[in-house]
Amino acid sequence: MRRVVVVGGGIAGIYFAYRLLQATEAEVLLVEPKPVHEFVIGIPMAYGGLVDFKDLIFPLTQMRRVKHVWDHAVALDGGCVRLSSSQSACGDYVVLAPGSYKLGTAEYWSVEGSEKLYGLMKKAKAVRFVVSEFTPVIGFQEMAYAVKTRFPDKEVSIHLVYVSDDYQFLLEPWKAKAKEAGVEVTDDPPSHKAVDELHISVPAVRPHPLAAGLDLRPETLETQYDRVYLIGDSALLKLGLPPIGWGSLWQASIVAQAIASEISRGYIDISPDEWSSQTDADSFKRWLTYRMVTGTPLVHLKGLYHIWARDVVSSL
């Protein structure tokens, strides 16, 4: 039986393992330093009151078909991943889904951090997200909409202090759509912070150190190393795309199909799946334009959450 080493127990790594084991038999090792999987794509649901924060945490001990290697991956060495314990996890395939490296103090990238931030938001009269990066990160938009929906009298605004040329095409339609939700999107910095205001400096996102030096083919997401793939935030950043959860699902599906078809049939075969009709970076960017302008309704996230809890995590 072929062995597949997956680095990272986030959205991309978990969904990849789920899709792979749906399609073929394989031994899957999941290298993840946390004892739990956090369904971070669902955090806006907790902000909107649809679920509790604790409902977004799934213990990895419940996995039966996937072996959890509770360790940090520190380097790639061919078909092996070196671990902080000085051991290595080796396989016929390696799928790197380590997330990304965050620079900043606003920790809404974990369930615990986002819950603490939510506590501060509830007390504030106004909540202002400040994005000052050359490549604005994505992930705060649904949070802003959810807070405004739950607390209609609270001022919620997004301040894009700098927007790269790659994102200018989104700005005007985004402003119009956000205004309908009662959220102001502006390219001006916020005024002087009042006592009852909360200013959230959105962190910068960079490719994870494990992705350093890796090139990848946009069609299959295979790196320059045979049967070594990169998916998730770091892969999206390297392709010039925003690191959002929907993009991670798209990439995880592509690589799962590629590996499963090679194991089962001896060649790579990829087709669109239920999360997206996109099969390349350009079409995904067009789809992303619609997704970014309209936002992701919380009811859609709730539906995804039920699928995640009922089918994805429980099947592993």
Image (tube, rainbow, N blue to C red):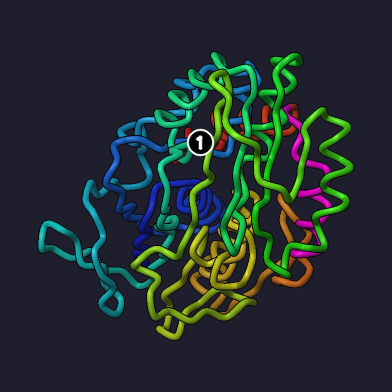
* Residue with the mark numbered 1: 39
Please name the residue shown 74% across and 20% down the image.
149
What kind of secondary structure does the magenta stretch mostly adopt? helix
Q: Nearer the viewer, residue 69 or 314?
A: 69
Residue 300 lies in the magenta stretch: no
User: Residue drawn at (60%, 49%), measured in percent from left and top?
Assistant: 131
Quarter of the C terminus within the rendering: top left
Examine the rendered structure and indicate whether residue 32 appears above or below residue 64.
below
Residue in front for this viewpoint, 163 or 230: 163
**Magenta stretch?**
285-298
Q: Position of residue 224 (x, y in %)?
A: 45, 85
Q: Is residue 1 visible?
A: no
Mark 1 crowd level (few <14, some 14–19, many ≥20, 10 Å Cα): many
Residue at the location (46% across, 39% down)? Answer: 106
Q: For residue 98, say whether it is visible.
A: yes
Instruction: Identify which residue is drawn at 35% across, 31% down.
Output: 59
Relative image position of residue 306 (x, y in whole percent): 62, 28
Q: Is residue 134 above or below residue 137?
A: below
**Where on the picture, by quarter, is residue 295?**
top right
Residue 36 in the image: x percent, y percent? 35, 35
Quarter of image, res 140: top right
